[in-house]
Amino acid sequence: MTKSKVKPKFTSNALRVLQTRYLKKNEARQVIETPRQMFERVAKNIAAADRLYDSRADVAVTAREFYELMASLEFLPNSPTLMNAGTPLQQLAACYVLPVEDDMRSIFDAVKHMALIQQGGGGTGFSFSRLRPKNDLVRTSMGMASGPVSFMRAFNAATDVIKQGGRRKGANMGMLRVDHPDILEFVNAKEKEGEFSNFNISVGITDEFMRALKRGSDYALVNPRTKKVVGRLNARAVFRTIAEMAWKNGEPGVVFIDTVNAVNPTPALGAIESTNPCGEQPLLPYESCTLGSINLLKTLREGPGGKEVDWRKLKKTVWAAVHFLDNVVDASRSPVKQVDEVTRGNRKIGLGVMGFADFLVELGISYASAEAVETAEEVMSFVQKESKAASAALAQKRGVFPNYNKSVYARKGPRLRNATTTTIAPAGTLSIIAGCSSGIEPFFGIAFTRTVLDGVVLPETNRLFEKTAKKRGFYSKSLMNKIAVLGSVRSLKEVPAEVRKLFVTAQDIPFQQHALIQAAFQKHVDNAVSKTINFAHNASPRDIEKAFLLAYELRCKGVAVYRNKSRTEQVLSRGSSKASYSEP
């Protein structure tokens, strides 16, 4: 690869994260590469896949393009690609779903496969809906089954002893259908803080359940072993319990599983049963997906009236990113043979965006406005359209994905290289590296702390707010001290009203607006959207119910909620206990 003049520039927090998690280390755990060398390593490795389709491909040119795409922080692939590309591990996908069948061998095969995948930096999702319910007959021993929740403990314990390559905490998604007889035990599984600490849990909500909820009627519980109805529960009572538990500690989330399968691109290969740990990537059993995010801040340019979107640059970035992610499918190696087979059969990629909140501020748009919803649709519809065009262009050169004839595209087109092209990931640590707000989330706070691996605490202050305060002449150390305590500027009269409106934070935004933003992106995303509806501490369980119902009505594929301070330990915390200012 010819030497590029593009030099990556990072914040101090970004460098700290890179050194802790991403840069190569020797046996003494000493960092042995620079961030530039990391990007060069990844670029060369991913570009080399071009030779699989053209023996004369100039991979040096492609490597330079990929390097500049990342080093400019215009696009970043998911963490395992940055960590593992060009290393002996070569496990590059972030998201996996593994099947759990109703027999002991399958259950512990899944535990083993989970351990291998997490060791390389992947996150794993499971549906436990096929497991027979608690106290059901086990014919081989004539004993009684212990049920899905008990087996989840084995997965949780195994994750406890695995640190993903020493750089990522193990993460799982556990799902159970709402019509499983053990659903109430599952819903309450995390009632005690610290239980199943390596799992996010979500209830698979069916359309039938939602109809029963609307009627206020009972619905059927089905034994997955016998397929017979074994009981009935009142839908409103179950829904209330789900909302109350989510109010109490943020879980369970809900996944509208029939909504997900209504747009499954390969229904002939089976139904989607679960997602990755953050919920944005529904996958078939044994399927993985590689993700990447475009930094929307880098798509802006100065226009006659201020900042505007450079659509030509965004198109170029989308096309380069689709090429990059398609190459990752070939370059990646899973420790589980079945995963490589299913993944390469569908070649799913998930291109998304990050920095949306920053992007809106630069455009002078409040996140809590109708214009923000319109902007979300405008940007994501463009990314969706161009990602499909890029995938179609690759298909002309490389062929369609192998399972194309078993897909919905075989009937109505177009001819694509990838069964899916778009996903909105949380982009948590990637956004720290890129120096932008995470995913499509609003600002959590104007000043807050973020806890990352091994309890490292990173203080963050919104640089766009500081820039605005200085430019408009209301910046002062005492003001920043106040913000460090409060986290928000909502109540600070010394901040102009229009600036307070522009720098609105997650807990200040009505849940309806959170849902509208998520739905706007979901309209133009193949897979799903990682988005949390944040509530203030004084929100009620009824507010949670309303948010779930609205998300369903808006055709979101799932929804996660979090009420501030509903857990004693949380990753993001507003304000700072060390600030010198205290409220009167």
Image (cartoon, rainbow, N blue to C red):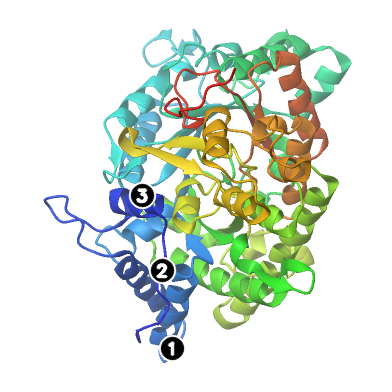
**Residue, x 38% and y 60% (percent of image)?**
82
Q: Please, what is the three-letter code of the amino acid marked with disc 3?
A: Val
Residue 466 location (% of width, % of height): 57, 49
Q: Is residue 99 visible?
A: no
Please name whichever residue, 545 or 238, is drawn nearer the observer in this view of the structure: 545
For disc 2, the marked residue is 8
- Helix or strand or loop: what does disc 2 sit on? loop
Q: Please, what is the three-letter code of the amino acid marked with disc 2?
A: Pro
Q: Quadrant of residue 321?
A: bottom right
Gap between marks 3 and 1 measured at Cα: 35 Å
Relative to residue 172, is residue 508 drawn left or right?
Answer: right
Relative to residue 113, is residue 184 drawn left or right?
Answer: right
Would you call the spot at circle 1 few (<14 residues within 10 Å), some (14-19), or many (20 or more)?
some
* Marks 3 and 2 close (CB-CB < 8 Å): no
* Marks 1 and 2 close (CB-CB < 8 Å): no
* Marks 3 and 1 close (CB-CB < 8 Å): no
- Helix or strand or loop: what does disc 1 sit on? loop
- Helix or strand or loop: what does disc 3 sit on? helix
**Residue, x 45% and y 86% (percent of image)?**
54
Residue 482 location (% of width, % of height): 56, 31
For disc 1, the marked residue is 57
Q: Residue furthest right?
A: 215
Q: Is residue 183 above or below residue 79?
A: above
Relative to residue 37, is residue 374 drawn left or right?
Answer: right
Residue 140 location (% of width, % of height): 38, 16
Q: Is residue 163 visible?
A: yes
**Residue, x 79% and y 24% (percent of image)?**
210
For disc 3, the marked residue is 17
Gap between marks 1 and 2 measured at Cα: 27 Å
Q: Residue furthest left?
A: 28
Relative to residue 341, is residue 380 drawn left or right?
Answer: right
Query: Is tag 3's residue or tag 1's residue first in the polypeptide sequence?
Result: 3
